Amino acid sequence: MADSTIDKARDLLAPPVRRSSPWGTLAAAGLAATAAVLMAGVMVLGPGVRFEEPPLVQPAFPNG
């Protein structure tokens, strides 16, 4: 009788086995990849980059 209650108590005290989902891992990897691409874009462009539009018509002879 005492042995069975001890065994039941041990079973109750054992941590439950958690099975991880591969979808969670895939989502975390996707989030990390997206963040890496965005951070690389910030590093390449930087905060002071401006894109100026070219003039519509360029003269044939720039010096006149």
Image (cartoon, grey):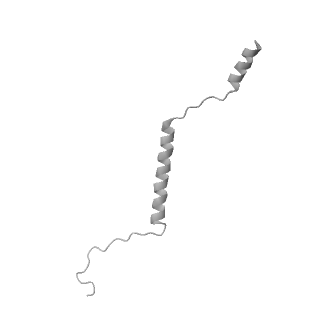
Q: Is 14 located above or below residue 34 in the figure?
A: above
Residue situated in front as seen by the camera: 19 or 57: 19
Q: Is 36 located above or below residue 17 in the figure?
A: below
Residue situated in front as seen by the camera: 61 or 6: 6
Residue situated in front as seen by the camera: 5 or 30: 5
Count of numbered circles on the image:
0
Which quarter of the image is occupied by the N terminus? top right
Q: Is 59 located above or below residue 12 in the figure?
A: below
Instruction: Locate residue 57 relative to residue 35 in the image: left or right.
Output: left
Instruction: Locate residue 18 relative to residue 36 in the image: left or right.
Output: right
Residue 21, given in percent of the width and then of the height, sits at: 51, 35
Residue at point 47% right, 59% down? 40
Instruction: Locate residue 14 relative to residue 47 in the image: left or right.
Output: right
Residue at point 42% right, 69% down? 50
Residue 45 figure quarter? bottom left
Quick one: which residue is furthest to the left in this view? 60
Residue 51 figure quarter? bottom left
Residue 46, given in percent of the width and then of the height, sits at: 48, 66
Residue at point 48% right, 63% down? 43
